[in-house]
Amino acid sequence: MTIYSYSRINTYFTCPAQFQFRYLEKRPSPVAEGIELFLGSRFHETMEFLYHQVPKRIPTVNEMVDYFRNHWEKHWQQSLQKQKDKNFKETLRIVNEGQSAEDYFQKGLLFVENYYHQYHPFDQDKTEGIELRVAFDLDSQGQYKMQGFIDRLGRDDEGTLWIHDYKTSSRKISQEDVKTEDQLALYQIGLSQNPKYGAKEKIKLIWHFVAFEKDQVIGERNPKEIGWLKEKYVAKIQTIEKAKSFPTKPGVLCGWCEFLTVCKDGLSFVDNRKKQREKTALPVEISSSPGNAEVSPLSPSGGPQEGPVGGAKVSAPAVLAAPMKKRRNFSPVSPDQLPLF
Ligand code: SF4
């Protein structure tokens, strides 16, 4: 029996062909890892480093920055080796034109610093789990199973559990759209079925869009909404399991798809889009998270616009509109590329 993850389900509805390549055929990626994923992973590691120590000891901001830098360099070396072994064209894949790995590295440093200064001394809640696995049933017969990993689980002084999630995307969902962001609510089901927690816990969901100075978006789901959510995901799994074919579904995320080089439809979509952009000469919006990204031309003014992100409306990328204040200067470091999630 397949145990589904949120991203496995999401992939099918984004593009069935990508789902087939990645999950059914388990094809190895023909290209290097994307920079957004790489950055996301390094940021998550840095948060793990922090919360494994708090509250016994609070690392300094310099320790955090060093940790991020060292891990970036270590993984960059690994990616270099992989590039040699697999004959990849590049060490890490950068889709956004005009961006370098160094740009992503510097962004990551700012994310770390900004998070540190915003939450220091990290006493908003007490950590109960980091990268905590949750496995759960969507139905009473146990026919539909899911699993996932909570970035961090905390409990505040009032006893509320907080499911934390870090997003390094340059787009942020709006407060009104948290009801359509299902990933953390699914993890809430997982906690309710965990003997340590159970269904009576008060649970809040918190996204940290760390590219934004005000990073938090908070949501919650009541028992009725959780019931609907289970039905919705059972229906999604049934659709996947009934599928007889897995057609391509070209869209804006093709540019970030690891199978683009072997997908005729995706290549032609990307090519047409490029030609259209050149015709209209509009700037291309920069995204740092393929998982969340909707890449579309900015309005000529470069001002706020809204577009779908994982099905939800998003606010404009503040990191572009109003860059965070840089608190320190960092010497350039060898770049890596990878997606952040
Ligand atoms: S390139 Fe686009 S259409 Fe092709 S598999 Fe990837 S997401 Fe699907």
Image (cartoon, helix red, strand yellow):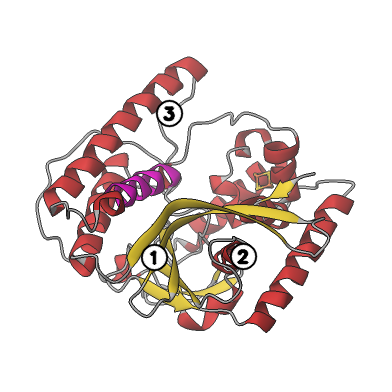
- Of residue 71 and residue 220, the one placed in the foreground of this image is 220
Whether residue 41 is in magenta: the answer is yes
Look at the numbered disc 3 and give the secondary structure of its residue: loop
Q: Earlier in the sequence, mark 2 or mark 3?
A: 3
Q: Are marks 3 and 1 in contact (CB under 8 Å)?
A: no
Other-residue count near label 2 (Cα within 10 Å), few / some / many at <14 / 14–19 / ≥20: many
Numbered disc in front, either 1 or 2: 1
Relative image position of residue 99 (x, y in whole percent) = 34, 47
Give the residue displayed 16% in from the left and 39% down from the top.
332
- Of residue 260 and residue 44, the one placed in the foreground of this image is 44
Q: Quadrant of residue 140?
A: bottom right
Give the residue displayed 37% in from the left and 73% down from the top.
216
Look at the numbered disc 2 and give the secondary structure of its residue: helix
Residue projecting furthest to the top: 85
Mark drawn on residue 186: 2
Q: Answer above or below: position of 267 versus 175.
A: above
Relative image position of residue 27 (x, y in whole percent) = 67, 30
CA separation in Å, label 2 and label 3? 36 Å
Numbered disc in front, either 2 or 3: 2
The type of residue carrying mark 1 is Gly
Relative image position of residue 1 (x, y in whole percent) = 80, 44
Q: Quadrant of residue 13?
A: bottom right
For disc 1, the marked residue is 154
For disc 3, the marked residue is 90
Q: Earlier in the sequence, mark 3 or mark 1?
A: 3
Q: Quadrant of residue 153?
A: bottom left
The type of residue carrying mark 2 is Leu
Give the residue displayed 62% in from the left and 28% down from the top.
28
The type of residue carrying mark 3 is Glu
Q: Is residue 324 visible?
A: no
Q: Earlier in the sequence, mark 1 or mark 2?
A: 1
What segment carries the magenta color? 37-49
